[in-house]
Image (cartoon, rainbow, N blue to C red):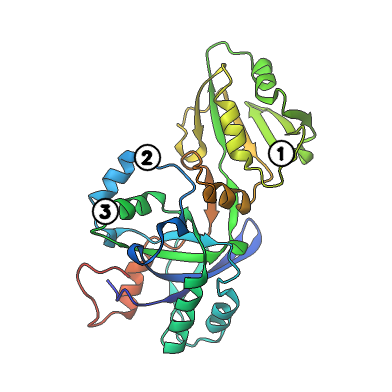
Amino acid sequence: MLDLNSYFIYRIEGNWNNTHHQVTGLLYNHNYNSELTKSIIPHEQTNPLRVRALENLSPNHYPPSFWITDSDNFPLDIINFWFDTAENKVVIPSTDGMLHTIFRLESDYQLETIKRALNKVPNFLIADGHHRYEVIRRNHTHASLPVFLISASQASFEFNEIYCHLKTNSNVTKTLNDIAQHWLVPCQLDNADFKICYNAQEWGYRHKEKTHHYNNDFSLIYEKLQTVSEISSINTAPEATHHLNDCILVKVIRSDVSHVINEGISGKKMPIKSTCFRHKPDENILQHITTTYSTKSIVEGVSL
């Protein structure tokens, strides 16, 4: 693959849900040993089986992890300017309906500017790639990881849905009352903090009292669901089975990236696959970069 010292500006843009969306970030190789571990924030739990499976693969075969930061030191304005005025941009083939374009930083001034900016960023939130990062953290033989880093202000974010399987002959009305007891009140769907669905029915609930501005509502409702006796199992949307009939579906409405960042900084980890961040780098971006930019610089066993 390509020289580890390369930095790329990577832009993803296009229409998403009938709205134009643009993300401009940095694609580079993050050296685990050169950074304080506490500055990298994994906010979700990992599956040990998946971590072990990845340990049997070379990091050279990983797609880039997707990280975000809410730091004002992320150089968004300058990388947008450099990208907009660059002449040697390359379009990367992709199948997600978005336009993926990259530009490799060449000048010493650009490289030093980016390095200084990254050194000032206090923390990075892992939006996607928790299992890949866990392998790097545990196995120092492979100490580097390709990363796509963007400003949190650009992130398209939502909490994933929660599916609750009910015990046989459970009373749905009683289950809803037990979920809402003491902290939620029924409301119109437009005013809801949570939407709860069961088959063709849908109910809205809001906080009875919302005294904490930075509530992580996903964690709150997930913890509450675990205490409800009528519920036999809980899964997040990507982890749920295909047999979803007669399941209670819970949607968190008023989600915010800051809720996840604050949870991660505090050291808490949410359930696996709790969040969804867009837009991710193309899974084959490193191969495309190698094909486009490499000639004699390809070195076996080296990523990005």
User: What label sits on residue 47 in the rendered view?
Assistant: 2
Using a 10 Å C-alpha cutoff, classify the residue at mark 2 as few (fewer than 14 neighbours), some (14 to 19) or many (20 or more): few
How far, Cα to Cα, is label 3 from label 2? 16 Å
Q: Is residue 184 left or right of residue 298?
A: right
Above or below residue 233? Residue 113 is below
* Element class at badge 2: loop
Image position of 68 (left or right of 18) = left
Report the residue marked by disc 3: 139
Q: Position of residue 285 (x, y in %)?
A: 38, 67
> Of circles 3 and 2, which is in front?
3
- Residue 111 placed where, x, y %? 43, 82
The residue that appears at 43% across and 76% down in the rendered structure is 8
Residue wearing tag 1: 193
In the image shown, does 303 or 119 lie closer to the viewer? 119
Of the residues shown, which amino acid type is indicated by label 1?
A: Asp
| Residue 22 seen in this snapshot | yes
